[in-house]
Image: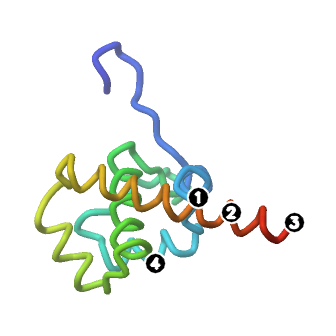
Amino acid sequence: MSGDGKRPKEFSINEVSQMTGVPSHTIRFWERDFGAYLHPSRTSGGQRRYSSSDVDVVEQIKHFRYYKKHTVKGTLEELNRGPLSNKEIENAVDEMARIILRKVMEKIAQSR
């Protein structure tokens, strides 16, 4: 529980998918490969519930798998290293911004 007595927010797999852009089936697959880091709780009905830290892990895995093009083994090695440094986060954001800009420019060129 959080300090104000409210229950911390938990997210469904669909909400996590929408927040991160990672398909639900991929998140379920990642639970197997990265179970030491990604372990959502379950409701009494068996539905997954992801914490904010689980969402952070999904984002980190996405970064290593999609942008750094790491294998599962390479991603595990990165996760074992610990959290990203501020410089690594800044570089990742810059890299994503370049990718988005390139895609926007391609769309503009296609529409002409």
The kind of secondary structure element at disc 3 is: helix
Question: Residue 29 shows which numbered tag?
Answer: 4
Of the image marks 3 and 4, the number of the one nearer the N terminus: 4
Residue type marked 3: Ser
Place of residue 56 in the rendered image (x, y in percent of width and height, measured from the top left): 36, 51
For mark 3, does the 10 Å Cα neighbourhood hold few (<14), some (14 to 19), or many (20 or more) residues? few
Question: Residue 111 shows which numbered tag?
Answer: 3
Position of 90 with respect to 26 (left or right) is left
Residue corresponding to mark 1: 101
Q: Nearer the viewer, residue 85 or 5?
A: 85
**Which residue occupies 35% across, 16% down?**
5
Whether pointer 1 and pointer 2 mark residues with C-beta atoms closer than 8 Å, the reply is yes
Residue corresponding to mark 2: 105
Of the image marks 1 and 3, the number of the one nearer the N terminus: 1
Question: Residue 81 shows which numbered tag?
Answer: none
Q: Is residue 92 above or below residue 52?
A: below
Viewer-side label of 3, 4: 3
Q: CA gap, disc 2 to disc 3?
A: 10 Å
**Which residue occupies 16% across, 76% down?**
77
